[in-house]
């Protein structure tokens, strides 16, 4: 089945019109007429700590105070490669030696 741009736009307009119609359910109408969730006076339940969709990003960071200035590219090839993905220079380089940097956890001052 092939869908062209016109058919997709017509279908999405029809879907929007159907969703904007007053209906039954938990959605409340606003002054603009768009369906919105019904208001509640409490926060949603907290996710469990063992939720596999959560990733802890607080550990494994390193800190260096000041700038790391990479040497400027000297040739045309170095200039060209310096803007290519995976060819970063300085602290952004994949093989940059950060052994002398301080290990920190987040949040960090």
Image (tube, rainbow, N blue to C red):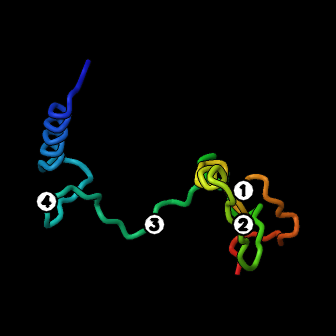
Mark 2 surroundings: few (<14), some (14-19) or many (≥20) residues within 10 A: few
70 shown above or below 19: below
Mark 3, secondary structure of its residue: loop
Q: Nearer the viewer, residue 18 or 9?
A: 9
- Of circles 1 and 3, the one toward us is 1
Between the residue at mark 1 and the residue at mark 2, the CA separation in whole angstroms equals: 10 Å
Q: Nearer the viewer, residue 55 or 108?
A: 108
Question: Can you identify the residue that label 3 sits on?
Answer: 43
Which residue appears at 23% of the width and 48% of the height?
Answer: 25
Question: Can you identify the residue that label 1 sits on?
Answer: 93
Question: Can you identify the residue that label 4 sits on?
Answer: 33
Direction bottom: furthest residue: 109
- Of circles 4 and 1, the one toward us is 1
Q: Quadrant of residue 63?
A: bottom right
> Nearer the N terminus, badge 4 or badge 3?
4
Left or right relative to 25: residue 89: right
Between the residue at mark 4 and the residue at mark 2, the CA separation in whole angstroms equals: 56 Å
Which residue appears at 77% of the width and 67% of the height?
Answer: 62
Q: Is residue 51 visible?
A: no
Between the residue at mark 4 and the residue at mark 1, the CA separation in whole angstroms equals: 51 Å
Which residue appears at 35% of the width and 66% of the height?
Answer: 40
Mark 1, secondary structure of its residue: loop
| Image spot of residue 91 (x, y percent) | 73, 63
Question: Can you identify the residue that label 2 sits on?
Answer: 70
> Nearer the N terminus, badge 1 or badge 2?
2
Q: Quadrant of residue 18?
A: top left
Mark 4 surroundings: few (<14), some (14-19) or many (≥20) residues within 10 A: few
Between the residue at mark 2 and the residue at mark 3, the CA separation in whole angstroms equals: 48 Å
> Nearer the N terminus, badge 1 or badge 3?
3
Q: Do the residues under discs 1 and 2 have CB atoms within 8 angstroms? A: yes
Mark 3 surroundings: few (<14), some (14-19) or many (≥20) residues within 10 A: few
């Amino acid at each position: 089945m092939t869908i062209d741009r016109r058919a997709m736009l017509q279908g999405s307009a029809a879907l929007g019109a159907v969703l904007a119609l007053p209906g039954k359910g938990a959605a409340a109408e606003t002054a603009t007429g768009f369906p919105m969730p019904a208001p509640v006076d409490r926060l949603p339940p907290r996710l469990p700590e063992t939720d596999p969709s959560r990733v802890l990003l607080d550990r494994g960071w390193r800190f260096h105070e000041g700038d790391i200035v990479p040497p400027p590219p000297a040739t045309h090839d170095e200039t060209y490669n310096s803007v290519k993905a995976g060819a970063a220079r300085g602290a952004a380089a994949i093989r940059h030696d950060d052994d002398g940097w301080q290990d920190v956890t987040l949040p960090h001052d």
